[in-house]
Structures are given as C-alpha cells and as structure tokens.
Amino acid sequence: MILKNMSFFVFLAWNLTFCVLPVAAVYAASETPIRIEADKMESFEKEGAVRFSGNVEAIQGDIKILSHVMTVTYEKTDPGKNKNDSGQKMKKLVATGNVKLYKGDTRGTAKTMEYYAKDSKVILKGDAKALQNKNWVEGERIIMYLDEGRSIVERGPEKGGRVKAFIMSGEGPGAAPSTKEKKK
C-alpha cells in the first residue's frame, strides 16, 4: 500500500511540475503568438531586454502568466536562415511579484519565476507551489529541468523548513486513482 501511494506521489509530483509549469518553454519554442499586456513597457536595446511592469498578463494559447513585472532578455539571431525568424531569440524570462501561472486545472504560484532557454530550466522561487485539482506540492524553490524530465522541490533555509505535499485519495473530483481502478 505504501509503495502504491509512493508511486502515485511520484506521478503527482511529475504531473504538477511538468504539466503545470513548463510554461516558459512553450512560450519560447511555440510559433503561437504571445499577447502581453501591462501598464508600462520599457525596451533596453543595448542590454537586449524588454521589461513589462504593472498588472502584467501574458497569454499564449491556454497558458497564462500574471505578475507585477516581467523581463524578457533576448539575443539577436540571423533572420536570413529562417523566414519565420524575427531576428531575436529569448535567452531568459523573469517574472516577479505575486507570480501566478495557469493552464487548465493546473496552476503554480511563487514570488519569482525564472526561465533559462538554453538550459531549458524553470525555477520558481519564494513560497513556490504547484497545484492540480486538490493536490499540491510546495517548497521554497521548485526547479524543473524540462529536457531531463525531472524536478527538485527544496525547503527554505529556516530551521525546520520542510517540503510539503498534499495528495487527495479516495473518490470524487480531484482524487487520486483508487487501487481498484489501477487493477482494471
């Protein structure tokens, strides 16, 4: 019974971190346009960055990111190689201040979200939490290695800080599959 619950926990943790939050990777790789709205936008061409601030809302398909500030750092590319190339490639995306990510029935929250395109890595920092239905995992930091298919949830530096998970079991919406359903 404990082993079955552990395998479900591993499945849940994977689902929460890799189905909820590979958001920035989808943003960087997809040809679907991204709509970003904010109270203010500043472009820093020398630094290769654009900063959106005040009630930032970024939407691409069914993925939404909300934050107080979002900074996208990019590098120039050779648009001659690909007719769809805009001449810029995202290097890093940082969302700060009450970050919320949504995709279907899953969501993530943190004080800060960082996405590193080259490493295909997402880091949620500061009261990081990933939720799906009534199940959740939380820690001070959640690191997702998207290409490797693995994640790490870390506790905070305070004494006694712990990683936490809440897994619903039983019947009903949002519940873990029962052992009867697994045997079928």
Image (cartoon, rainbow, N blue to C red):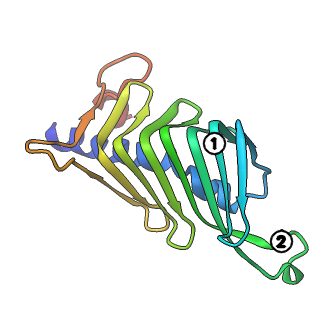
**Among the two numbered marks 2 and 1 on one chain, the one whose residue lies closer to the N terminus:** 1
The secondary element bearing badge 2 is classed as loop
Compared across the picture, whether 158 is left or right of 78 comes to left
Above or below, 110 relative to 118? above
| Residue 42 image offset from top left, x and y in percent | 71, 52
Q: Is residue 129 left or right of residue 6?
A: right
Q: Quadrant of residue 69?
A: top right
Q: CA distance from mark 2 to mark 1?
A: 26 Å
Question: Which residue is tagged 1?
Answer: 53
In percent of the image, x 50 and y 71: which residue is there? 119
For the view shown, which residue lies furthest in the top direction? Answer: 172
Q: Residues within 10 Å of mark 1 (few under 14, many from 20)?
A: some
| 51 or 106, nearer to the observer | 51
**Residue 83 position within the rendered picture, expressed as x and y whole percent measured from the top left:** 91, 74
Looking at the rendered image, the quarter that the C terminus falls into is top left
Label 1, secondary structure: give it.
strand
Point out residue 135 in the picture as x, y percentages from the top left corner: 36, 30
Three-letter code for the amino acid on which mark 2 is drawn? Asp
Which of the two marks, 2 or 1, is nearer to us in this view? 1
Mark 2 crowdedness (10 Å alpha carbons): few <14, some 14-19, many ≥20: few
Decide: is 35 above or below 143: above
Would you identify the image quadrant in which residue 183 lies?
top left
Q: Mark 2 and 1 residues: CB-CB less than 8 Å, in contact?
A: no
Q: Name the residue located 48 percent from the left edge and 39 percent from the top edge.
A: 97
Residue identifier under label 2: 85
Residue at 43%, 67% (x, y): give it.
Answer: 148
**Most foreground residue, 151 or 184:** 151
Question: Total number of numbered labels?
Answer: 2
Residue sitting nearer the eye, 153 or 12: 153
Say left or right for 169 vs 61.
left
Instruction: Tell me the amino acid under the disc marked 1.
Output: Ser
